Image (cartoon, grey):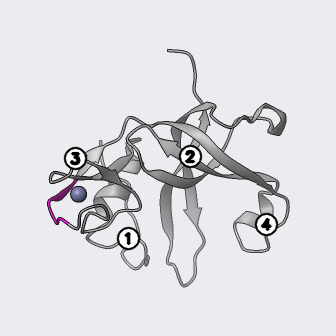
Amino acid sequence: MTATPTPANLPDIDAFTRPYWDAAAEGRLLLRHCAACDRAHHYPREFCPHCWSDAVTWRRASGRAVLYTWSVVHRNDLPPFGDRVPYVAAVVDLAEGPRMMTEIVDCPERDLRIGMDVEVAFRRERLPEGDLGEGVLHVPVFRPRRAD
Ligand SMILES: [Zn+2]
């Protein structure tokens, strides 16, 4: 499988976070894992925020999480969000421990429950041409977990 090209001039995608976005393009969620204290963290950092060790590497996450909290956004003037309202901005607790800001998809608002099982999915975002460059980003979002 070839990695989806990402624009080199995106502020979020540098040599450090590139593996994260490349994995996302292939449907895998990566977390930073610390060998010193055996804990994961997110967002990605070069040092472990728990013990400050630099023995931190990328590790594939299970993609499983539970919903911690959410908010239905009805108005957002910033592109591309303006065309997308209402959407569900959420915080989920990943099975590996870290808490992550994300969005819940494929779930009617009335079915949202704190503690519900969710799983990662990747939404393909076409980046607008402009100061961020042009390209495609695969953004992790979460949806209700399907039965195994
Ligand atoms: Zn650590």
Q: SS at mark 1?
A: loop
Going 77% across and 57% down the picture, which residue do you hit? 84
Secondary structure predominantly adopted by residues drawn in magenta = loop
> What residue is shown with label 2?
92
- Residue type at mark 3? Asp
Going 31% across and 63% down the picture, which residue do you hit? 18
Tell me which numbered mark, 1 or 2, is placed earlier along the sequence. Answer: 1
Q: SS at mark 4?
A: helix
Please check the rendered image and state whether residue 61 is part of the magenta-colored stretch, yes or no: no
Q: SS at mark 3?
A: loop
Label 2 Cα crowd, 10 Å radius (few <14 / some 14-19 / many 20+): many
> What residue is shown with label 4?
82
Residue 130 at least partly seen: yes
- Residue type at mark 2? Val
Horizontally, residue 20 falls left or right of residue 87, namely: left
Horizontally, residue 129 falls left or right of residue 95, namely: right
Q: SS at mark 2?
A: strand
Residue 12, image quadrant: bottom left
Residue 111, image quadrant: top right
Tell me which numbered mark, 1 or 4, is placed earlier along the sequence. Answer: 1
- Residue type at mark 1? Ile
Please check the rendered image and state whether residue 56 is part of the magenta-colored stretch, yes or no: yes
Mark 2–mark 3 distance (CA, rounded to whole Å): 20 Å
The disc placed on residue 38 is: 3
Label 3 Cα crowd, 10 Å radius (few <14 / some 14-19 / many 20+): few
Label 3 beta carbon less than 8 Å to ligand 1: yes
Label 4 Cα crowd, 10 Å radius (few <14 / some 14-19 / many 20+): few
Tell me which numbered mark, 3 or 1, is placed earlier along the sequence. Answer: 1
**Quadrant of the picture in which ligand 1 is shown:** bottom left
User: Which residues make up the magenta segment?
Assistant: 53-57
> What residue is shown with label 1?
13
